[in-house]
Image: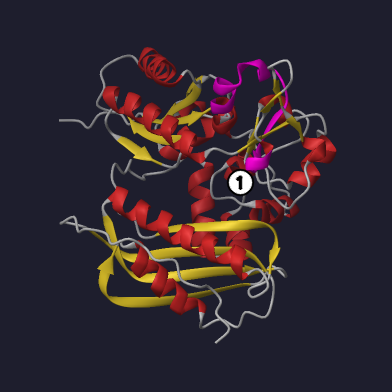
Protein backbone atom coordinates (compact mmCIF):
# COMPACT_ATOMS: atom_id res chain seq x y z
CA UNK A 1 0.00 0.00 0.00
CA UNK A 2 1.45 3.37 -1.03
CA UNK A 3 2.18 5.93 1.65
CA UNK A 4 0.03 9.07 1.42
CA UNK A 5 1.52 12.15 -0.21
CA UNK A 6 3.07 14.32 2.48
CA UNK A 7 1.05 17.44 3.21
CA UNK A 8 2.68 19.45 5.98
CA UNK A 9 1.20 22.72 7.19
CA UNK A 10 2.93 25.51 9.07
CA UNK A 11 0.48 27.73 10.94
CA UNK A 12 1.74 31.10 12.11
CA UNK A 13 -0.44 33.51 14.07
CA UNK A 14 -0.46 37.00 12.58
CA UNK A 15 1.42 39.56 14.73
CA UNK A 16 0.31 37.43 17.65
CA UNK A 17 1.06 39.51 20.76
CA UNK A 18 -0.07 42.71 19.08
CA UNK A 19 -3.26 41.05 17.82
CA UNK A 20 -4.10 39.86 21.34
CA UNK A 21 -3.68 43.43 22.59
CA UNK A 22 -5.98 44.74 19.84
CA UNK A 23 -8.69 42.41 21.11
CA UNK A 24 -8.35 44.24 24.43
CA UNK A 25 -8.04 47.70 22.87
CA UNK A 26 -9.98 47.59 19.58
CA UNK A 27 -9.80 51.39 19.30
CA UNK A 28 -6.11 50.95 18.36
CA UNK A 29 -6.83 48.95 15.19
CA UNK A 30 -5.13 50.47 12.16
CA UNK A 31 -2.56 52.29 14.28
CA UNK A 32 1.15 51.71 14.82
CA UNK A 33 1.35 49.81 18.11
CA UNK A 34 4.51 48.48 19.78
CA UNK A 35 4.48 45.81 22.49
CA UNK A 36 7.39 45.75 24.91
CA UNK A 37 6.79 48.22 27.67
CA UNK A 38 6.70 47.52 31.40
CA UNK A 39 3.88 47.73 33.90
CA UNK A 40 4.28 51.51 34.09
CA UNK A 41 3.09 51.70 30.48
CA UNK A 42 -0.40 50.44 31.25
CA UNK A 43 -3.08 52.71 29.75
CA UNK A 44 -4.80 54.97 32.27
CA UNK A 45 -8.30 56.42 32.29
CA UNK A 46 -8.48 60.12 31.57
CA UNK A 47 -10.89 62.65 33.09
CA UNK A 48 -13.41 61.88 30.33
CA UNK A 49 -13.19 58.15 31.08
CA UNK A 50 -11.32 57.40 27.86
CA UNK A 51 -8.09 55.45 28.00
CA UNK A 52 -4.87 57.41 27.66
CA UNK A 53 -2.07 55.47 25.96
CA UNK A 54 1.66 55.98 26.26
CA UNK A 55 3.62 57.01 23.17
CA UNK A 56 6.84 55.34 22.14
CA UNK A 57 8.60 58.73 22.07
CA UNK A 58 8.37 58.88 25.88
CA UNK A 59 10.10 55.53 26.47
CA UNK A 60 13.36 55.58 28.41
CA UNK A 61 15.20 52.36 29.11
CA UNK A 62 17.05 49.42 27.55
CA UNK A 63 14.14 47.18 26.64
CA UNK A 64 13.55 45.61 23.26
CA UNK A 65 10.46 45.37 21.10
CA UNK A 66 8.54 42.17 21.70
CA UNK A 67 6.38 42.64 18.60
CA UNK A 68 4.56 45.32 16.66
CA UNK A 69 1.50 45.73 14.49
CA UNK A 70 1.88 45.68 10.72
CA UNK A 71 1.41 49.47 10.70
CA UNK A 72 4.45 49.82 12.99
CA UNK A 73 6.42 47.37 10.88
CA UNK A 74 5.77 49.57 7.86
CA UNK A 75 7.68 52.26 9.77
CA UNK A 76 10.64 49.91 10.30
CA UNK A 77 9.86 48.68 13.81
CA UNK A 78 10.34 44.94 14.26
CA UNK A 79 10.71 42.47 17.13
CA UNK A 80 14.07 42.36 18.99
CA UNK A 81 14.82 45.97 18.02
CA UNK A 82 15.92 48.24 20.85
CA UNK A 83 13.04 50.36 22.10
CA UNK A 84 15.05 53.58 21.94
CA UNK A 85 15.88 52.93 18.29
CA UNK A 86 12.23 52.11 17.60
CA UNK A 87 11.21 55.40 19.23
CA UNK A 88 13.28 57.31 16.68
CA UNK A 89 11.59 55.47 13.80
CA UNK A 90 8.03 55.67 15.12
CA UNK A 91 7.81 58.25 17.93
CA UNK A 92 4.00 58.47 17.72
CA UNK A 93 3.45 54.71 17.95
CA UNK A 94 1.36 53.52 20.88
CA UNK A 95 3.39 51.66 23.53
CA UNK A 96 1.81 48.80 25.47
CA UNK A 97 3.25 46.51 28.15
CA UNK A 98 3.71 42.80 27.50
CA UNK A 99 1.19 40.41 29.04
CA UNK A 100 2.58 36.91 28.63
CA UNK A 101 -0.15 35.28 30.70
CA UNK A 102 -2.72 36.52 28.21
CA UNK A 103 -0.59 35.43 25.23
CA UNK A 104 -0.18 31.95 26.68
CA UNK A 105 -3.96 31.76 27.20
CA UNK A 106 -4.66 32.54 23.55
CA UNK A 107 -1.87 30.19 22.49
CA UNK A 108 -3.59 27.31 24.25
CA UNK A 109 -6.92 28.26 22.69
CA UNK A 110 -5.68 28.24 19.10
CA UNK A 111 -3.68 25.03 19.50
CA UNK A 112 -6.65 23.21 21.03
CA UNK A 113 -8.85 24.43 18.15
CA UNK A 114 -6.40 23.07 15.59
CA UNK A 115 -5.91 19.75 17.39
CA UNK A 116 -9.67 19.14 17.38
CA UNK A 117 -9.50 19.03 13.57
CA UNK A 118 -5.97 17.76 12.91
CA UNK A 119 -4.38 16.15 15.99
CA UNK A 120 -0.88 15.57 14.55
CA UNK A 121 0.55 18.86 15.76
CA UNK A 122 4.15 19.86 16.53
CA UNK A 123 4.38 22.78 18.94
CA UNK A 124 7.04 25.24 17.80
CA UNK A 125 6.42 28.06 20.24
CA UNK A 126 3.72 30.33 21.54
CA UNK A 127 2.48 31.42 18.11
CA UNK A 128 3.35 28.72 15.58
CA UNK A 129 2.83 25.00 14.95
CA UNK A 130 3.40 22.36 12.28
CA UNK A 131 0.48 20.10 11.34
CA UNK A 132 0.71 16.79 9.46
CA UNK A 133 -2.32 16.68 7.13
CA UNK A 134 -1.11 13.72 5.06
CA UNK A 135 -3.83 11.35 6.25
CA UNK A 136 -6.71 13.79 5.68
CA UNK A 137 -8.76 13.03 2.58
CA UNK A 138 -10.36 16.49 2.48
CA UNK A 139 -9.30 18.91 -0.24
CA UNK A 140 -6.36 20.87 1.10
CA UNK A 141 -7.58 24.46 0.71
CA UNK A 142 -11.00 23.86 2.26
CA UNK A 143 -9.27 21.97 5.08
CA UNK A 144 -6.86 24.87 5.66
CA UNK A 145 -9.75 27.31 5.65
CA UNK A 146 -11.63 25.15 8.17
CA UNK A 147 -8.59 25.26 10.47
CA UNK A 148 -8.32 29.03 10.07
CA UNK A 149 -12.03 29.45 10.81
CA UNK A 150 -11.69 27.31 13.95
CA UNK A 151 -8.76 29.42 15.15
CA UNK A 152 -10.71 32.63 14.61
CA UNK A 153 -13.79 31.24 16.34
CA UNK A 154 -11.72 30.19 19.36
CA UNK A 155 -9.61 33.34 19.65
CA UNK A 156 -10.94 36.13 17.47
CA UNK A 157 -7.52 36.18 15.79
CA UNK A 158 -6.24 35.48 12.28
CA UNK A 159 -3.45 33.18 11.21
CA UNK A 160 -1.57 32.32 8.04
CA UNK A 161 -1.04 28.76 6.83
CA UNK A 162 1.53 27.41 4.40
CA UNK A 163 1.10 23.87 3.08
CA UNK A 164 3.85 21.99 1.27
CA UNK A 165 5.46 18.55 0.97
CA UNK A 166 7.70 19.20 3.98
CA UNK A 167 8.35 21.43 6.98
CA UNK A 168 11.05 23.49 5.28
CA UNK A 169 8.79 24.61 2.44
CA UNK A 170 5.71 24.97 4.66
CA UNK A 171 7.59 27.35 6.96
CA UNK A 172 8.71 29.48 4.02
CA UNK A 173 5.35 29.66 2.28
CA UNK A 174 3.37 30.52 5.44
CA UNK A 175 5.06 33.94 5.17
CA UNK A 176 4.21 34.52 1.51
CA UNK A 177 0.61 35.72 1.88
CA UNK A 178 0.54 37.26 5.36
CA UNK A 179 -1.62 38.30 7.05
CA UNK A 180 -4.58 35.90 7.02
CA UNK A 181 -3.31 33.91 4.04
CA UNK A 182 -3.31 30.36 2.73
CA UNK A 183 -0.41 29.31 0.52
CA UNK A 184 -0.17 25.86 -1.04
CA UNK A 185 2.87 24.75 -3.02
CA UNK A 186 4.10 21.48 -4.52
CA UNK A 187 7.57 20.43 -5.64
CA UNK A 188 6.67 21.66 -9.13
CA UNK A 189 6.21 25.17 -7.72
CA UNK A 190 9.73 25.42 -6.26
CA UNK A 191 11.42 27.14 -9.25
CA UNK A 192 8.69 29.80 -9.56
CA UNK A 193 7.72 30.35 -5.91
CA UNK A 194 10.80 29.46 -3.82
CA UNK A 195 13.94 30.08 -5.87
CA UNK A 196 13.34 33.86 -6.30
CA UNK A 197 13.22 34.35 -2.52
CA UNK A 198 16.21 35.67 -0.56
CA UNK A 199 18.40 32.93 0.89
CA UNK A 200 17.87 34.33 4.39
CA UNK A 201 14.20 33.32 4.16
CA UNK A 202 15.28 29.75 4.93
CA UNK A 203 15.11 28.91 8.62
CA UNK A 204 18.71 27.97 9.40
CA UNK A 205 20.45 30.57 7.23
CA UNK A 206 21.29 33.25 9.77
CA UNK A 207 22.62 36.78 9.21
CA UNK A 208 26.28 35.74 9.13
CA UNK A 209 25.70 32.90 6.67
CA UNK A 210 23.50 35.14 4.51
CA UNK A 211 26.22 37.81 4.46
CA UNK A 212 28.82 35.22 3.45
CA UNK A 213 26.57 33.86 0.71
CA UNK A 214 25.97 37.36 -0.58
CA UNK A 215 29.72 37.97 -0.75
CA UNK A 216 29.92 34.89 -2.99
CA UNK A 217 27.22 36.32 -5.25
CA UNK A 218 24.57 33.92 -3.90
CA UNK A 219 21.60 36.08 -2.96
CA UNK A 220 18.55 33.91 -3.59
CA UNK A 221 17.53 30.34 -2.92
CA UNK A 222 17.75 29.81 -6.68
CA UNK A 223 21.35 31.03 -6.63
CA UNK A 224 22.06 28.38 -4.03
CA UNK A 225 20.42 25.69 -6.14
CA UNK A 226 22.61 26.61 -9.10
CA UNK A 227 25.82 27.01 -7.09
CA UNK A 228 28.83 24.74 -7.47
CA UNK A 229 28.76 22.33 -4.48
CA UNK A 230 32.56 22.57 -4.27
CA UNK A 231 32.31 26.35 -3.80
CA UNK A 232 29.87 25.87 -0.95
CA UNK A 233 32.01 23.21 0.71
CA UNK A 234 35.15 25.36 0.49
CA UNK A 235 33.37 28.19 2.29
CA UNK A 236 30.99 26.42 4.68
CA UNK A 237 32.42 22.96 5.31
CA UNK A 238 30.98 19.62 4.24
CA UNK A 239 27.99 19.23 6.55
CA UNK A 240 26.52 22.73 6.21
CA UNK A 241 27.21 22.91 2.46
CA UNK A 242 25.41 19.59 1.90
CA UNK A 243 22.46 20.95 3.87
CA UNK A 244 22.46 24.13 1.76
CA UNK A 245 22.26 22.06 -1.43
CA UNK A 246 19.37 19.99 -0.07
CA UNK A 247 17.30 22.89 1.15
CA UNK A 248 17.83 24.89 -2.04
CA UNK A 249 16.06 22.07 -3.87
CA UNK A 250 13.28 21.95 -1.27
CA UNK A 251 14.38 18.66 0.29
CA UNK A 252 13.49 18.03 3.94
CA UNK A 253 12.61 14.66 5.47
CA UNK A 254 12.03 15.81 9.05
CA UNK A 255 8.85 14.37 10.56
CA UNK A 256 6.22 16.34 12.44
CA UNK A 257 7.12 15.55 16.06
CA UNK A 258 3.97 15.48 18.15
CA UNK A 259 5.63 15.23 21.56
CA UNK A 260 8.89 16.32 23.15
CA UNK A 261 10.44 16.15 26.59
CA UNK A 262 11.26 19.41 28.29
CA UNK A 263 14.98 19.67 29.12
CA UNK A 264 14.99 22.75 31.33
CA UNK A 265 12.68 25.36 32.81
CA UNK A 266 13.84 28.85 33.74
CA UNK A 267 12.78 32.29 34.88
CA UNK A 268 14.75 35.52 34.54
CA UNK A 269 14.37 39.25 34.99
CA UNK A 270 16.11 42.12 33.18
CA UNK A 271 16.24 45.25 35.30
CA UNK A 272 15.22 48.71 34.15
CA UNK A 273 18.46 50.00 35.71
CA UNK A 274 21.64 48.22 36.75
CA UNK A 275 21.46 47.06 40.36
CA UNK A 276 24.35 46.73 42.78
CA UNK A 277 24.54 43.41 44.59
CA UNK A 278 24.97 45.00 48.02
CA UNK A 279 23.68 48.55 47.74
CA UNK A 280 20.43 47.32 46.12
CA UNK A 281 20.10 44.16 48.21
CA UNK A 282 16.63 45.12 49.45
CA UNK A 283 15.47 45.37 45.83
CA UNK A 284 17.23 42.25 44.55
CA UNK A 285 16.23 39.88 47.36
CA UNK A 286 12.46 39.88 46.67
CA UNK A 287 13.10 39.68 42.90
CA UNK A 288 15.31 36.63 43.42
CA UNK A 289 12.77 34.98 45.70
CA UNK A 290 9.92 35.71 43.30
CA UNK A 291 11.84 34.10 40.44
CA UNK A 292 12.29 30.95 42.52
CA UNK A 293 8.61 30.88 43.50
CA UNK A 294 7.49 31.33 39.90
CA UNK A 295 9.93 28.68 38.70
CA UNK A 296 8.60 26.22 41.28
CA UNK A 297 5.08 27.02 40.09
CA UNK A 298 6.10 26.32 36.48
CA UNK A 299 7.51 22.93 37.49
CA UNK A 300 4.39 22.01 39.42
CA UNK A 301 2.02 23.03 36.62
CA UNK A 302 3.98 21.06 34.04
CA UNK A 303 4.43 18.02 36.29
CA UNK A 304 8.24 18.07 36.53
CA UNK A 305 10.85 17.88 39.25
CA UNK A 306 14.53 18.69 38.72
CA UNK A 307 17.85 17.91 40.36
CA UNK A 308 20.13 20.63 39.02
CA UNK A 309 19.48 24.23 40.09
CA UNK A 310 21.34 27.02 38.35
CA UNK A 311 21.62 30.79 38.20
CA UNK A 312 22.37 33.15 35.35
CA UNK A 313 23.80 36.63 35.86
CA UNK A 314 24.48 39.33 33.30
CA UNK A 315 26.52 42.31 34.42
CA UNK A 316 26.40 45.93 33.29
CA UNK A 317 29.24 45.26 30.82
CA UNK A 318 27.05 42.52 29.24
CA UNK A 319 29.36 39.76 30.44
CA UNK A 320 27.56 36.76 31.86
CA UNK A 321 28.19 34.02 34.36
CA UNK A 322 26.34 30.83 35.31
CA UNK A 323 26.61 28.49 38.29
CA UNK A 324 24.89 25.15 38.94
CA UNK A 325 24.29 22.89 41.92
CA UNK A 326 23.04 19.30 41.70
CA UNK A 327 20.83 18.13 44.57
CA UNK A 328 20.62 14.56 45.93
CA UNK A 329 16.86 14.49 45.20
CA UNK A 330 14.78 16.10 42.46
CA UNK A 331 12.49 18.89 43.62
CA UNK A 332 9.75 21.30 42.62
CA UNK A 333 9.80 23.05 46.00
CA UNK A 334 10.27 26.83 45.97
CA UNK A 335 12.19 26.91 49.27
CA UNK A 336 14.60 24.20 48.12
CA UNK A 337 15.17 25.94 44.80
CA UNK A 338 15.71 29.26 46.58
CA UNK A 339 18.28 27.74 48.93
CA UNK A 340 20.19 25.97 46.14
CA UNK A 341 20.16 29.03 43.91
CA UNK A 342 21.46 31.07 46.85
CA UNK A 343 24.35 28.63 47.22
CA UNK A 344 25.16 29.10 43.54
CA UNK A 345 25.09 32.86 44.01
CA UNK A 346 27.63 32.71 46.82
CA UNK A 347 30.12 31.19 44.36
CA UNK A 348 30.12 34.37 42.25
CA UNK A 349 32.19 37.49 42.94
CA UNK A 350 29.57 40.21 43.01
CA UNK A 351 31.70 43.29 42.45
CA UNK A 352 29.84 44.69 39.43
CA UNK A 353 26.36 45.97 38.83
CA UNK A 354 23.79 43.52 37.51
CA UNK A 355 21.42 43.98 34.58
CA UNK A 356 19.87 40.48 34.56
CA UNK A 357 19.21 37.73 37.08
CA UNK A 358 17.85 34.28 36.24
CA UNK A 359 17.18 30.92 37.87
CA UNK A 360 16.79 27.59 36.08
CA UNK A 361 16.16 23.91 36.79
CA UNK A 362 17.60 21.12 34.62
CA UNK A 363 17.98 17.33 34.87
CA UNK A 364 14.20 17.14 34.79
CA UNK A 365 12.00 14.11 35.31
CA UNK A 366 8.27 13.57 35.50
CA UNK A 367 6.76 13.83 38.94
CA UNK A 368 4.67 10.75 39.66
CA UNK A 369 3.38 11.61 43.09
CA UNK A 370 2.26 15.05 44.23
CA UNK A 371 4.07 16.12 47.38
CA UNK A 372 2.99 18.83 49.75
CA UNK A 373 4.95 22.03 49.20
CA UNK A 374 6.12 23.82 52.37
CA UNK A 375 5.80 27.58 52.59
CA UNK A 376 8.83 29.50 51.37
CA UNK A 377 10.76 31.64 53.81
CA UNK A 378 12.42 34.64 52.21
CA UNK A 379 16.05 34.82 53.25
CA UNK A 380 18.60 37.52 52.67
CA UNK A 381 20.24 37.69 49.28
CA UNK A 382 23.81 38.85 48.71
CA UNK A 383 24.82 38.58 52.39
CA UNK A 384 27.96 40.38 53.44
CA UNK A 385 29.60 37.27 54.89
- Foreground: 39 or 47? 47
Q: Where is residue 179 in the image (x, y as percent from the top left)?
A: 58, 22
Crowd tier of the residue under label 1, counting other residues whose Cα lies within 10 Å: few below 14, some 14–19, many 20 or above = many
Q: Is residue 14 visible?
A: no
Scheme of colours in the image: secondary structure
Q: Where is residue 211 in the image (x, y as percent from the top left)?
A: 71, 53
Q: Position of residue 57 (x, y in %)?
A: 82, 37
- Foreground: 18 or 295? 295
The outermost residue toward the bottom is: 385
In the image, residue 214 sits, relative to residue 126, either above or below, namely below
Determine if the magenta segment contains residue 208.
Answer: no
User: Where does the magenta region start and end?
Assistant: 20-40
Check the picture and name the quadrant holding the C terminus: bottom right
Q: Residue at x 44, y 66 (%)?
A: 378
Q: Can residue 373 be seen in this view?
A: yes
Check the picture and name the quadrant holding the N terminus: top left
Determine if the magenta segment contains residue 21.
Answer: yes
In the image, residue 243 sits, relative to residue 175, either above or below, namely below
Q: Residue 178 is drawn in which quadrant? A: top right
Label 1 belongs to which residue? Answer: 224
Q: Which residue is drawn at 69% across and 76% down?
A: 352
In the image, residue 192 sits, relative to residue 309, either above or below, namely above
Is residue 55 shown left or right of residue 184? Answer: right
Secondary element at image label 1: helix
Q: Position of residue 339 (x, y in %)?
A: 40, 73
Q: Which residue is drawn at 58% across and 29% down?
A: 15
Q: Residue 360 is drawn in which quadrant? A: bottom left
Is residue 119 shown left or right of residue 99? Answer: left
Q: Residue 5 is drawn in which quadrant? A: top left
Amino acid sequence: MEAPIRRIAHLDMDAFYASVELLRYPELRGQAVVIGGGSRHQPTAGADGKLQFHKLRDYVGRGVVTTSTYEARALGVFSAMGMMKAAKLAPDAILLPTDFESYRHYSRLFKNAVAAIAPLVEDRGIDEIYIDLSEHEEEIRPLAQRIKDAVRAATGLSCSIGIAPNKLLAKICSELEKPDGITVITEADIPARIWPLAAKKVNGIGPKAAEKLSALGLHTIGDLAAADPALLQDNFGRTYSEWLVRISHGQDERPVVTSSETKSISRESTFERDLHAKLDRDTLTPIFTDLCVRLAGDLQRKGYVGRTIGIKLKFSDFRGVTRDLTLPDATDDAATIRQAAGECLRRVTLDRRLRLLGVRVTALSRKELADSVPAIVQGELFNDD
